[in-house]
């Protein structure tokens, strides 16, 4: 309560909080505005059985995809465009120079290219979704044809660009982490409905109504959710500290001094992105198979489905998560560049030679941390599925991917708010110091 009181007693921070809440409210209102020319109820019925990949897309759009609203694409095209440019930065020298050597101007240029690519991707995806809607049945689209596809593509791409703008406004004028907060808001918005469903199932279980799980299952579910939540908080805040010493320097008093610091490496450097990639890759064949007549694709997709071959799906999912964890970590953190910068600044790791040996040492530690982080991501993602598959009649909304996103964004937001509060107290201290000095000068005194 003291933290909350401090946040709202800070005028600047209070203004940022109110602005962020207004932007999130506008985003949630747009989720309920449907694309013209579509029977949203008929579309929702057909998409409800369309596959797990569309459920993943619907998760990141905050339920807007299955409602076919103007924000159906959500922030997904922007995330895809950002990932594409990050990957291209590793192979295209021009992008690599902009990312690493051009500083703020280079980052601004990359952000501009990301926006352009977002518009293109959103239009293509919108056109594809319009084609998908037409293929679901004659009662879904009121007037099918190329005009509807173009109208749908323009509407969805405009909505995606507007969502991107909302995220940037929250980052610049709000409390930060705009894109992450939009995804966070979409997931949290479904929690009241999910909690109501679970309570209704618990009531039916106590009254022995219908085919629902026994009451003890819900207690086990609560314990499992609490344990997983605590585990996620601990791992997301876990770091491996590598000690760094800097060469001795002689100061103005001719005394040698040595500075020490440490390099923090997160256990989960890749974040939630490997789980998102793995879910999309595994569920993509099954989703495509439902809208095509390729029998071989349907049979192949059945072997990696949690409903038909659960343990095969678990093995494939773990392998894919590990692969994408190493892949994404290699993009986020470059041991060679870090070792080179450390050498230029006179820093070294005790017992390790600067340069190549330092890079090899950090790469070895990072590989171990990445493997541990990948296993953690896979376990957290699989646990809810294991619970629902082993306990028939239990419908669990808050899955592992949702939990990782919600906890990660919440921790980042709290850290951001703390930094604003500390900055405000620091500025207030400086203002008081200047004010006191000015009063002494007016009174003819000398500031001590």
Image: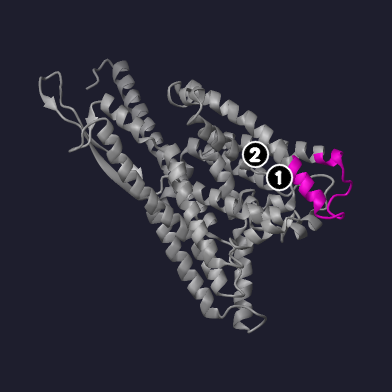
| Local SS, label 1 | helix
Q: Taking 109 as reference, is 144 left or right? A: right
The single residue placed furthest to the left in the displayed view is 254
Q: Are marks 2 and 1 in contact (CB under 8 Å)?
A: yes
Residue 263 seen in the figure = no
| Picture disc at residue 379 | none
Q: Taking 52 as reference, is 13 left or right? A: left
Magenta-span inclusion, residue 70: no
The single residue placed furthest to the bottom in the displayed view is 208
10 Å crowding of disc 2: few (<14), some (14-19), many (20+): many
Q: At which x and y percent is residue 408? A: 47, 49
Residue 341 lies, with reference to residue 135, above or below; the image says above
Q: At which x and y percent is residue 195? A: 59, 65
10 Å crowding of disc 1: few (<14), some (14-19), many (20+): some
The residue to which callout 2 is attached is 163
Of the numbered discs 2 and 1, the one sitting upstream in the chain is: 1
Residue 314 lies, with reference to residue 431, above or below; the image says below
| Local SS, label 2 | helix
Nearest to the observer: residue 12 or residue 375 = 375
Residue 149: which quarter of the image? top right
The single residue placed furthest to the front in the displayed view is 296
Nearest to the observer: residue 210 or residue 120 = 120
Coloring basis for residues: one colour
Q: Identify the residue at image location x=15%, y=21%.
A: 251
The residue to which callout 1 is attached is 30
Q: Taking 246 as reference, is 23 left or right? A: right
Residue 152 lies, with reference to residue 342, above or below; the image says below
């Amino acid at each position: 309560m003291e933290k909350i009181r401090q946040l709202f007693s800070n005028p600047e921070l209070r203004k940022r909080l109110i602005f962020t809440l207004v932007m999130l409210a506008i985003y949630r209102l747009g989720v309920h505005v449907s694309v013209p020319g579509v029977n949203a109820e008929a579309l929702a019925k057909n998409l409800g059985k369309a596959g797990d990949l569309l459920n993943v897309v619907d998760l990141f759009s905050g339920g807007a995809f299955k409602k076919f609203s103007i924000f159906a694409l959500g922030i997904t095209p922007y995330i895809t465009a950002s990932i594409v440019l990050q990957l291209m930065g590793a192979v295209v020298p021009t992008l690599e120079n902009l990312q690493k050597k051009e500083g703020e101007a280079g980052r601004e240029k990359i952000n501009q290219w990301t926006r352009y690519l977002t518009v293109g991707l959103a239009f293509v995806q919108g056109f594809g979704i319009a084609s998908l809607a037409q293929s679901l049945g004659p009662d879904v689209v009121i007037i099918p044809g190329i005009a509807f596809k173009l109208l749908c593509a323009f509407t969805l791409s405009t909505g995606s660009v507007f969502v991107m703008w909302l995220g940037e406004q929250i980052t610049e004028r709000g409390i930060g982490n705009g894109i992450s907060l939009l995804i966070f808001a979409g997931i949290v918005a479904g929690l009241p409905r999910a909690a109501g469903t679970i309570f209704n199932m618990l009531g039916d279980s106590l009254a022995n109504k219908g085919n629902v799980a026994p009451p003890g299952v819900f207690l086990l579910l609560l314990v499992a959710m609490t344990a997983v939540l605590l585990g996620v908080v601990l791992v997301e805040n876990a770091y491996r500290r590598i000690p760094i010493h800097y060469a001795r320097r002689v100061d103005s008093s001719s005394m040698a001094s040595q500075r020490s610091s440490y390099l923090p490496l997160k256990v989960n450097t890749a974040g939630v992105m490997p789980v998102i990639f793995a879910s999309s890759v595994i569920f993509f064949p099954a989703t495509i198979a439902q809208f095509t007549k390729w029998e071989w694709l349907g049979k192949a997709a059945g072997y990696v489905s949690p409903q038909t071959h659960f343990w095969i799906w678990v093995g494939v999912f773990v392998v894919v998560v590990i692969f994408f964890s190493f892949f994404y970590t290699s993009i986020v953190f470059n041991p060679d560049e870090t070792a080179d910068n450390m050498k230029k600044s006179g820093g070294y790791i005790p017992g390790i030679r600067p340069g190549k040996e330092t890079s090899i040492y950090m790469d070895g530690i990072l590989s171990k941390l990445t493997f541990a982080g990948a296993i953690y991501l896979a376990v957290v993602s699989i646990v809810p599925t294991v619970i629902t598959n082993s306990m028939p009649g239990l419908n669990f909304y808050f899955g592992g991917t949702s939990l990782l996103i919600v906890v990660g964004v919440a921790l980042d937001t709290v850290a951001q708010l703390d930094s604003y509060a500390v900055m405000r107290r620091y500025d207030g201290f400086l203002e008081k110091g200047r004010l006191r000095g000015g009063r002494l000068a007016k009174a003819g005194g000398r500031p001590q």
